[in-house]
Amino acid sequence: MTQYVLRRMLLTLPMLLGISIIAFTFMNVAPGDPVSAMIDPQQGTGFDSAALREKLGLNQPLPVRYVNWLGEVVRGNFGYSYNTGQPVLRRIGERIPATVELMGVALVVSTVVGCALGIGSALRRYSFWDYGLTILSMFWISVPAYFFALIGLYVFSLKLQILPTFGIATPGSTNPFDHALHLILPAGVLSLEALAATARYTRSAMLEVLQQDYVTTARAKGLPARLVTLRHAFRNALLPVITVVALRVPVLLGGAVVIESMFQWPGMGTLAILSIQQRDYPVLMGLTLMTASLVLVSNLVADVLYAYVDPRIRYA
């Protein structure tokens, strides 16, 4: 297993290199540039764009700029923000805790609740509960997250006024649950799609496992229904669920861009939107590499969990 993990980690290096080349190229050939975004219309012609372009290194050919950027990355320096002058890692590091908290809560809620709903739906196959959950799941998967965000803001913030509308905390508030109240809406909306997908895959996997002979044998032995369901059936149905949950992590990060913007959550999503508006290429490249690394790590974690859940799986 150790050799397999090391081999997979080595394979990620050329993949990250290819991703960085594609991302760097598309960012720099897109319409607009950082200098144009920095120009203040009130300054008129007094703005020396050529000097600023030379200072930022934007006057060099694209391949030269990429090689210079890659050389700094290898040394652990992801560059400096064009707009604030801060190191890219510091700017991103300031936003990571808020995004990790939002994604972590959404992932836990979607996994726990989704698995529970999927198990219940499989045990009550073709019942009113099963049909109702199927309809809800398809609705949650089909409707974009921003629509649920708007509904949540209208119902719980505007009409009922029980949840805050935006931000991570209320300035000057002494309520110990203030931060948790701010987290409910964005985390709940972000978890809906992952919850529905987890529930559907759990149901399908459980229906297949419940028909197996070892489950019938466990029931014939007189084991409690809960023990048969959780230990004998659910554990053997975990493989597709692990795949869904592991691959949902980068999807949650992508969804966090929209949700954080709508709820003004100070995480990496709002930083990504701000960097796109300002054409802040170094910050965008840092976020792109971090997202790509998260996808690769999620796949690796899923493979490792396969072997842990199913002892029959061995990696050479």
Image: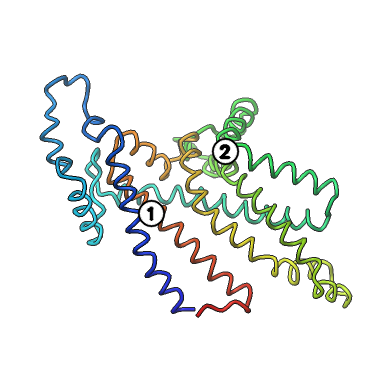
In the displayed structure image, the side of residue 112 where residue 31 appears, left or right: left
Q: Amino acid at mark 1?
A: Met
Mark sitting on residue 145 = 2
Q: Position of residue 101 (x, y in %)?
A: 49, 51
Q: Position of residue 38 (x, y in %)?
A: 23, 31
**Residue drawn 58% across the image and 74% down it:** 307
In the displayed structure image, the side of residue 136 where residue 12 appears, left or right: left
Q: Secondary structure at mark 2?
A: helix
**Residue drawn 77% across the image and 61% down it:** 207
Work out whether 216 lies above or below 70. below
Q: Position of residue 282 (x, y in %)?
A: 27, 46
Q: Amino acid at mark 2?
A: Ala
User: Do tag 1 and tag 2 residues touch (Cβ < 8 Å)?
Assistant: no
Q: Secondary structure at mark 1?
A: helix
Question: Of the residues under marks 1 and 2, which one precedes in the sequence?
Answer: 2
Work out whether 304 lies above or below 138. below
- Report, in whole angstroms, how far the alpha carbon at label 1 lies from the one at label 2: 23 Å
**Residue drawn 80% across the image and 45% down it:** 131
In the displayed structure image, the side of residue 230 where residue 10 appears, left or right: left
Mark sitting on residue 290 = 1
